[in-house]
Amino acid sequence: MTRRRLLQEGTRTHAVPPIPDPSASAASPEATEFRSRPCSGERVCPWRTDADLTAFSEEDMLRLQRAQQGVMCPTDTSEADVARLTHAPRMACHKDQPDTAHPMRLCAGWLAVVGPDHIGVRLSIFEGSLPPEAVEPDTRTWPALHASLAELLARRQEQLAAQEGDGAP
């Protein structure tokens, strides 16, 4: 069964080490705001498999790739690797903008797909500023999501190629 199929059914495909009890932390960090579901409407969440990814810019894709730098690989063992991992950006919702009612909530789709492996997100859960449910949502009523950033980027390239083939600008 593919990861995408499993995501559609709301099942994890990889083991995430247990997250320590945040109540053991002495400090009470400020809560991190996040979206509870992938966006719908005119411009849907890019993590949704039904998203028109041609509506997103190259800069949007670069932001996703920069946020991916927080995902640990087995070869990440040096001090430079640890610094990169802990300082990697997290992905805000594409609909949230600075100086609005809800500036920069974390993207629900990104949290569901990338969040469990993103060191910054895991630290936020450990510190108690982000609830564990943010990365393990009840996805039974969610739309299907891309299983990885690589899959999302490949689908975008397919959509761009199809758009060029249709003579679209």
Image (cartoon, helix red, strand yellow):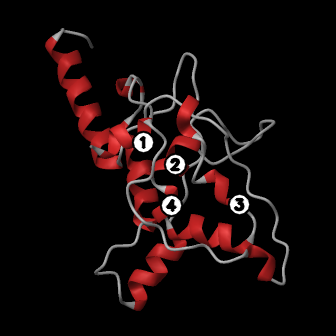
Determine contact: label 2, label 1, CB under 8 Å.
yes
Q: Earlier in the sequence, mark 1 or mark 4?
A: 1
Q: Nearer the viewer, mark 1 or mark 3?
A: 1
The residue shown at (58%, 54%) is: 135
Q: Earlier in the sequence, mark 2 or mark 3?
A: 2
Q: Residue furthest left?
A: 165
Mark sitting on residue 116: 4
- Can you say whether 141 is above or below 125 in the image? above
**How far apart in space, not on screen, are marks 2 and 3 (Cα)?**
13 Å
Disc 3, SS: loop
Within-10-Å neighbours for mark 4: few <14, some 14–19, many 20+: many
How far separated are the C-alphas under marks 3 and 4? 12 Å
Identity of the amino acid at label 1? Leu
Percent x, y of residue 34? 68, 47
Q: Is residue 18 above or below residue 35?
A: below
Callout 4, which amino acid? Pro
Q: Is residue 125 above or below residue 67?
A: below
Front-most of residues 110 and 93? 110
Q: Is residue 3 left or right of residue 45?
A: left
Residue 112's disc number: 2
Q: What residue sits right under mark 3 in the picture?
A: 130
**Which image quadrant for residue 49?**
top left
Residue density around tag 3, few if under 14, some if 14–19, many if 20 or more, within 10 Å:
many
Q: Amino acid at mark 2?
A: Ala
Badge 2: residue crowd in 10 Å (few <14, some 14–19, many ≥20)? many
Which numbered marker is on residue 7? 1
- For marks 2 and 1 on the same chain, the one whose residue lies earlier in the sequence: 1
| Disc 2 to disc 3: CB gap under 8 Å | no
The amino acid type found where label 3 is placed reads Leu
Crowdedness of circle 1 by 10 Å Cα count: few (<14), some, many (20+)? many
| Left or right, residue 157 beside residue 7 | left
Q: Quadrant of residue 99?
A: top right
